[in-house]
Amino acid sequence: MILAWIRIIVYTAAAAVPLLLCPGCSTPVSRDIASLLFDGVPALPVPEKFCASWMAEKEAEEKLARQKEKGPAPSGSSHPPYAEKKCNSCHDTSKEGGLAAPMEKLCFLCHKDIIKGAEVHAPAVAGNCLACHQPHDSVFPSLLKTEKAKLCDSCHMEKRLTTGLHASVSKAGLVCTDCHDPHAGNAKYFLK
Ligand code: HEC
Ligand code: HEC
Ligand code: HEC
Ligand code: HEC
Ligand code: HEC
């Protein structure tokens, strides 16, 4: 008799284990306990399997928490004057347009040497930096507006003179900036 009670207590406690591990799971536990009491030895589900969705949710939460601790994702970027809250180095409400200098001159205030070489890329030399960059921060490296592999395609949809060459390098997994500087250079087509 005492043995039987010990067995019931042990089985009931065992049945509660997945419950403890998985507070978010809504399994009909009462039925399980009933089956323990009346059907003898139960087949307990593996907690991980039992609560796959709860485990996945918890893992995602932990990942997010770790990421928050570390700051922005490693591939992202943040502009130092923005991160250091030197907002006034670019924003000036007393000026027309609200910027410290007209947009096409603003980035050159600090990046004086970004255009180096005899061959220059039209959007960069014109100061249209925001065609490719974000001013504050980005989920991509180098404050880019989009993935490096897609950046140039937004404008360069023209049929290339060198279509054969370019088709083969794209297939090889190279991106435009592996060969071309995005801003300027001394070689024709600002090849690196
Ligand atoms: C390197 C220059 C630069 C710095 C530093 C900078 N901004 Fe900006 N910000 C810009 C530019 C350029 C735009 C206009 C973007 C556009 O037209 O798409 C802008 C746009 C904005 C806007 C308009 C909404 C938006 O996001 O497009 C807000 C608000 C703003 N900035 C706030 C700030 C604050 C707050 C800081 C400091 C923490 C800051 N900025 C620092 C250059 C800068
Ligand atoms: C107040 C000075 C200042 C202004 C104005 C400024 N920058 Fe910067 N920028 C910096 C500094 C400082 C760095 C970090 C050192 C470096 O890379 O030169 C930087 C770095 C960058 C980088 C490299 C970021 C990276 O993660 O590699 C880019 C891209 C950039 N700036 C674009 C711009 C654009 C676009 C503008 C105009 C909207 C602009 N900057 C205006 C100061 C400035
Ligand atoms: C056609 C797109 C494009 C334009 C326009 C452009 N950039 Fe960039 N920029 C890039 C790319 C792509 C990179 C990253 C280069 C790399 O990783 O090889 C970059 C990198 C940078 C960097 C990081 C340091 C370096 O030299 O690589 C700075 C600073 C920068 N750009 C500033 C500017 C400024 C200022 C302007 C406007 C005068 C501008 N860019 C216009 C595409 C552009
Ligand atoms: C905002 C639009 C824009 C983006 C984005 C852009 N370009 Fe350009 N690009 C131009 C314009 C405009 C010209 C000048 C076209 C001309 O002179 O016929 C040009 C010219 C060029 C040339 C010289 C072509 C020649 O015949 O002299 C090369 C090479 C080039 N771009 C490469 C790139 C690369 C690499 C990227 C990505 C990093 C890029 N471009 C992104 C607008 C863009
Ligand atoms: C493997 C290196 C390499 C890569 C990657 C590359 N290019 Fe080129 N590109 C060249 C060379 C070399 C030339 C010069 C060909 C010539 O002189 O006939 C050139 C020329 C150009 C020209 C001017 C001549 C023309 O055919 O119109 C443009 C525009 C251009 N590339 C854009 C791009 C863009 C956009 C990408 C990304 C999709 C890219 N390139 C990727 C090597 C490369």
Image: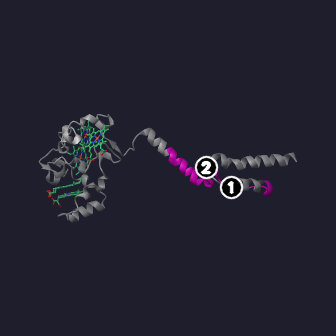
Q: Secondary structure at mark 2?
A: loop
Q: Is residue 159 left or right of residue 33?
A: left
Q: Is residue 58 left or right of residue 78?
A: right
Q: Is residue 60 above or below residue 165?
A: above
Which stretch appears magenta? 37-62
Residue kind at label 1, given as amino acid type: Pro
Q: Residues within 10 Å of mark 2 (few under 14, many from 20)?
A: some
Residue 3 or residue 123, whichever sits in front: 123
Whole-percent x and y of residue 30?
A: 72, 53
The response on whether ligand 1 sits within 8 Å of label 2 is no
Furthest toward the right, the residue is 1
Whole-percent x and y of residue 96?
A: 19, 41
Q: Is residue 83 magenta?
A: no
At horizontal 76% and vertical 56% (from top left) the residue drawn is 35
Residue 138 or residue 8, whichever sits in front: 138
Label 1 with label 2: CB-CB less than 8 Å? no
Q: CA distance from mark 1 to mark 2?
A: 12 Å
Q: Secondary structure at mark 1?
A: loop
Q: Quadrant of ligand 1?
A: top left
Whole-percent x and y of residue 147?
A: 32, 53
Snapshot quadrant of residue 91: top left
Q: Residues within 10 Å of mark 1 (few under 14, many from 20)?
A: few
Give the overall secondary structure of the magenta segment: helix
Find residue 28 and name its label.
Answer: 1
Whole-percent x and y of residue 192?
A: 20, 50
Please name the residue that numbered disc 2 is placed on: 24
Q: Is residue 173 above or below residue 186?
A: below
Q: Is residue 48 magenta?
A: yes
At horizontal 72% and vertical 48% (from top left) the residue drawn is 14
Residue kind at label 2, given as amino acid type: Gly
At horizontal 26% and vertical 34% (from top left) the residue drawn is 88
